[in-house]
Image (cartoon, rainbow, N blue to C red):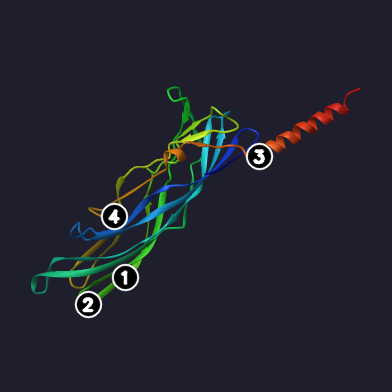
Amino acid sequence: MTLGVLQTARSQIYFASTPVNGYVQLAVEDAAGSTSAYGSGNAGFGILNDTVYLDLTADTIREVGSVSLGGSGSFTFDDGRIVHGSGGLQFVDANVTVTLNVPSALSFDTGFQPLLWVPAIQSYEFTASLGSLPVTGNYSVVTGGQTYTGPLSYNLFTGMLLLFQQVSTSGYPAFVTLTGLEGGELQQPGPQLVYFTALNGLDIELQAGEQDGTYSYGWNLNPTQVMADLIPEPSTFLLLGFGAMTLCAFLKRQRP
């Protein structure tokens, strides 16, 4: 983890850069058929870059930064069921191919959040989450000798992926300790993406997620990385020392 701090008139600005473990599942199912008709892949988190604006005068905190992402969902699954055709009931099958992509980095800005002092843990608490993940891609459905294609674009809710939620100021302003970056497994219904009826009577309803339109995600840091001491850069001390020497020289010249 690389760390640093700069000082402003009312607040401190802290920097943190650290690897983070976690993923967001990229999945699509045909909600018009069986819940077993789906495919999925994962997008994994990489490096978290977080700038923290801490103002103990106003009792506020703000997190601005990004987390890198890698991977995509590219998969094919078989689909099919009994439909009403011109000759009565008949089984119709389909082959579905989906490609999903995510941006190389997901940006966030929590805005200024109020700090709540918690005596039991001798730290401040606040609320900050990652937000939504934009997903783009395309689909192809082959059934009845016909091919149906089109683009996909939607946002996946990731509001339970929590950024740092606690700050200990025992070492302020030289350093603070941030904790609370977490997010366990959560299944969240995904949006409907595509709905159409093929010429052979097969209804196709592509929905983000699997098993009744749900998907999962989560992230975490190792225990040694969660408790991150943000220590000032040496240049900060040099600037403060230079300022003090300048002030001393000025006062010396003012003496009678």
Which residue is tagged 4?
A: 209
- In primary-sequence order, the first of circles 2 and 3 is 2
Q: Indicate which disc, 4 or 3, sits on the residue closer to the N terminus.
A: 4
Dot placed on the residue nearer the N-terminal end, 4 or 2: 2
Q: CA distance from mark 4 to mark 2?
A: 27 Å
Q: Amino acid at mark 1?
A: Thr
Q: Position of residue 240 (x, y in %)?
A: 71, 34
How many C-alpha atoms fall within 10 Å of the one at disc 1: few (<14), some, or many (≥20)? few
Q: CA distance from mark 4 to mark 1?
A: 19 Å
Q: Is residue 229 left or right of residue 43?
A: right
Q: Which residue is mark 2?
A: 145
Choose mark 2 or mark 3, whichever is in front: 3
**Contact? badges 1 and 3 (CB < 8 Å):** no
Q: Kindly report the distance in space between the C-alpha atoms of the residues bearing marks 1 and 3.
A: 57 Å
State the image quarter where residue 86 is shown. Answer: bottom left
Residue kind at label 4, given as amino acid type: Gly
Amino acid found under the numbered disc labelled 3: Pro
Of mark 1 and mark 3, the one earlier in the sequence is: 1
The quadrant of the picture occupied by the C terminus is: top right
> Where 203 falls versus 160 (above or below)?
below
Indicate which disc residue 149 carries: 1
SS label for mark 1 = strand
Find the distance from the CA under tag 1 to the CA under tag 2. 13 Å
Mark 2 belongs to which amino acid? Gly
- Secondary structure, mark 2, is loop
Report the residue at 45% width, 52% height from top.
46
Tag shown at residue 26 = none
Residue 32 on image: x %, y %: 20, 60
Q: Quick one: which residue is furthest to the front in this view?
A: 224
Query: Residue at coordinates 49% horizontally, 49% vertically from top-left?
Result: 66
